[in-house]
Image (tube, coloured by chain):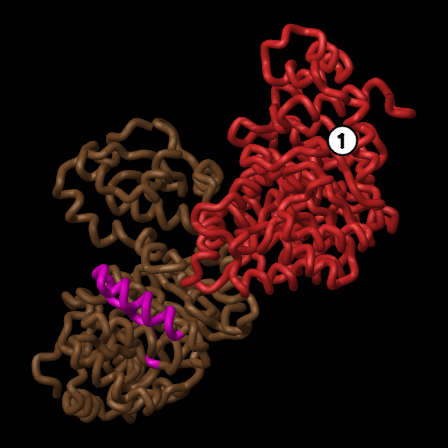
Chain colours: A brown, B red
Amino acid sequence: MSAGWSDERIARAGITAACDPGAPDLADLVTRMGAAEVWEALRQGPRQTAWSRRAATLDLAELVAQARRSDIRFLIPGDDEWPAGLEDLTRARVGGFGGPPIGLWVCGRARASELLDGSVAIVGARASSPYGDEVAMAMAHDLSRAGRCIVSGGAYGIDAHAHQGALAAQRPTVAFLACGLDRPYPVGNQSLFARILDHEGLLVSEFVPGSAPTKRAFLARNRLIAAASAATVIVEAAARSGARNTIAWAHACARPTLAVPGPVGSAMSVTPHRLIRDGEATLAADADDVLVVVEPLSQGPQLASGGNSRLLDAVPDELMAVREVLPGRGNVSLAEVASAAGRPVPQCLAALSRLEDLGLVAMTDDGLWRLVRPGLPSGGARR
Amino acid sequence: MSAGWSDERIARAGITAACDPGAPDLADLVTRMGAAEVWEALRQGPRQTAWSRRAATLDLAELVAQARRSDIRFLIPGDDEWPAGLEDLTRARVGGFGGPPIGLWVCGRARASELLDGSVAIVGARASSPYGDEVAMAMAHDLSRAGRCIVSGGAYGIDAHAHQGALAAQRPTVAFLACGLDRPYPVGNQSLFARILDHEGLLVSEFVPGSAPTKRAFLARNRLIAAASAATVIVEAAARSGARNTIAWAHACARPTLAVPGPVGSAMSVTPHRLIRDGEATLAADADDVLVVVEPLSQGPQLASGGNSRLLDAVPDELMAVREVLPGRGNVSLAEVASAAGRPVPQCLAALSRLEDLGLVAMTDDGLWRLVRPGLPSGGARR
C-alpha cells in the first residue's frame, strides 16, 4: 500500500486518521499494546465508537497518496528526526488532553528535530495590537539570529508576526497547525505558509490531510507547541485567551514560560501581566531574557567538550548565581534554592534544569537538588 | 528657649541640626544613652568632628524660631502622631545608612501618623515619560480614593504626578523632602507643595530649616519614604536610577515592593522590568494589584471586631490562598509557603505579614510560619 512503510507506521497513520489527537488513554494504549495491535482492534472490533467506525471505513492507501501529492510526509516516534521534547507529553495533562502524538504529518524539507530541539515558542492573541506585533517580530528576529528556531501556530496576529520576524532574519520557523496540511488554516495566511516552506521551515500537524480545524483541535495542538520547544513566550493576550492554554501545557511539561509586559492600559497585556504578577511566567523584555533560560540547552555539548574549567567559565552568570546557592554537601529543595537565590521558583527550576543538562547539578530521586563538581561523575559527588 | 519643649525634644532638634541624618551609629547611641546625653556630649566635648563643631556653635533658639515662622513643627518618637513604620529602620541598613530619624520637621495641619500609617509610596524617575506620568497619576488617584494616602518625594516626574493624582482625587498626600521645609526643593514645584498643604497634606523632612539638598540627603530621605509607607510602587526608572535605592529600603524594612510594567522599548521601564523579572518586585498593573498586598493592614481592627467567622470571610482571596497552604499542624518556611502557593517569595512574605497582623498566622522564633485559628490565642494554636 505505502511503499516501504512499516506496519507500525501504517498503523499510526491510520490511528491519527480515525482517532482524535490528544487523547491520553489512546496514547497509553498504543504504548502498552503497540500501534499495530491498537489499529487492528479499531478496524476489526465492534463499530461502537466514532473512532472504530472511522477506522473500519478508512481508505488508508488513498490517504497516504493524498499526503504524498501534497508533499506531506509522516513521522513516528523512533524516527531520527522525531522531536525529543514530545516525550514529556507522556505524563503531561491539561483539561483532559495529554499524551505524545501518535504521529506527525510534516511538510517541508528540514529535519524536524534539528529545528525543534532547543526552539522557542512565541504565542499570543490573534487580535494583537501594533505594539504586540512589533515585539513579536523583534523577539523572533533576535532569537532566530541567536540560533533559536521559532515555533508558533498559524494564526493571524502574534503567531504570524513571530514567523515573519524569523523570516526577516532569513531563518526557518515551524508552524504547528490544527488542521490537515493540504488545507492550512487560515486561508489568509497561505502566502506566509508558502514563505515558511521556501525558507526551509516546516508545517507540522497531528491531523491527517483533509482535516478541518476545530476548537478541540486547537487545544490538542497547543500541547505540541509547548512540548516541542524549550521555552514558551506569550507576547499579548486578552483576559480570556487561548494562549493561556499553551502556557498551561508549558508548565505541565516543565518548560520555562515567559511573558512580555506592555502598557498597563492595554487589554492585550492583561494576561501577560497576570501571569507575571502571579509568578506563572518570567518577565521577558527582550530576546536576552529568553536566552538566559534556554541558552545552556544547545550549548551543552559544545561546552562540555571544552574541558571542565572552561565549562564553568562559559556558564552564564544567571545560571551560576543559582548554582552557587547549593550547599557544598547535602541536598536542598527547589523552594530552598529559590529562597536562597532570591528568585521566583519557575526561574530557578529552569536554571536547575539547564545546570543538570550541563552536569553541574543533579536531582535526587526524591526531587531534591545537589551540587555536582565538573569532571566528577554525578554519583561520585560528595553527599 | 522653646516654650513647652522638653529637654528630649530640644536635644533631638539640636542633633538633627548638627548631625547628618541616616547615620545608624548615631541612632543607636541616642537609643542607648538618651538624646539629652548625646546632645550634651556633642556640645561640651572636644570639637574634633564636624558634628561637634556644628553643635557647639548652633543657635538652637533661633533655629526653633525660624521653624515657627515657617509653620514648621518638630516631631519626635513617642509623639502621638509619630509614624509607626519608622520603627522598622532600627535594624534596616542600605549602603551604610540606617536608623530611625532622630526627629522630623513637619509642615501642614494633618497628623502625620493618620496619613502615613497604611500609606502607599509611589516613586520613580524625574525624567519620566508621558506614559509613566499618566500611570502615576491614575494609580495615585485610585489608591487615594481607596483610602490610601500617597507618599512620595518632591521631584519632577513621577513624584510630582503621584501627588497630582491624589490631589485630583481631593485627598491629602505626604512629600518627604531632602532639605529644609522653608526652602522646599525644587523651586519649580513650589505651587505643588502649596497645593499639598492646602489639601491637608504634609511636607516632612529630617533636615532643619535652611538646609540645602545634597546627594547624601536624598539617600537618607529615601529610607523614610520606604519605612513610613506600607508598600512602595516604582512606576518608571531608567537602568541607573535613584528609585532603586528606595526599593532597597523597602526590602530592608520588609515592605511589599511593586513595579509598573510598560512598553519593552521604553528606557524608563528598564528598572521596573528588571525588578519584576528578578523577583524583587511584584508586577502592579493597577491600584487593585497594590491594594491586594496592603489592604488587610488598615482593615485589621475593623475585621477583628466583627467576629471570627466574619474575619475569615472578609479576608481577601489572595491572602486566604496563601494561608491555605499552611499545614494544619507544624511549621513551614517562607520558601515552602512560596513553593506550595506557587507565588513569588516577596508576595508570600507580604501576605503572611498581613495575615499575622490579622492574627491568622504566626511566625515562630526561628522564622517559620504556622497556622493560627481565629479566636484561639496565638500561643494556643496546635503545633
Query: How many marks on residues?
Result: 1
Q: Is residue B383 visible?
A: no
Who's the residue at 83% across and 37% down the image? B69
Residue B152 as seen in the image, left or right of residue A368: right
Q: Is residue A269 visible?
A: yes
Above-or-below relation of A91 to B307: below
Above-or-below relation of A324 to A68: above
Q: Quadrant of the C terminus of chain B?
A: top right
Q: Compare residues A314 and B124 and report the one nearer the observer.
A: B124
Who's the residue at 56% across and 55% down the image? B235
Q: Quadrant of the N terminus of chain B?
A: top right
Q: Compare residues B313 and B34 and report the one nearer the observer.
A: B34
Above-or-below relation of B246 to B169: above
Q: Badge 1 is on which residue?
A: B379
Answer with the quarter of the image where residue B36 lies: top right
Answer with the quarter of the image where residue B337 lies: top right
Residue B33 as seen in the image, left or right of residue A37: right
Secondary structure found at label 1: helix
Magenta residues span A133-154
Answer with the quarter of the image where residue A371 lies: top left
Q: Position of residue A52 (x, y in %)?
A: 35, 86
Residue A72 as seen in the image, left or right of residue A125: left
Query: Which residue appears farthest toward the left when viewing the image?
Result: A4
Q: Position of residue B286 (x, y in %)?
A: 62, 62
The three-letter code of the residue at mark 1 reads Gly
Above-or-below relation of B142 to B357: below
Residue B155 as seen in the image, left or right of residue A257: right
Who's the residue at 26% across and 42% down the image? A315
- Magenta-colored stretch includes residue A146: yes
Q: Position of residue B12 (x, y in %)?
A: 76, 23
- Magenta-colored stretch includes residue B210: no
Question: Callout 1: few (<14), some (14-19), or many (20+) C-alpha neighbours within 10 Å?
Answer: few
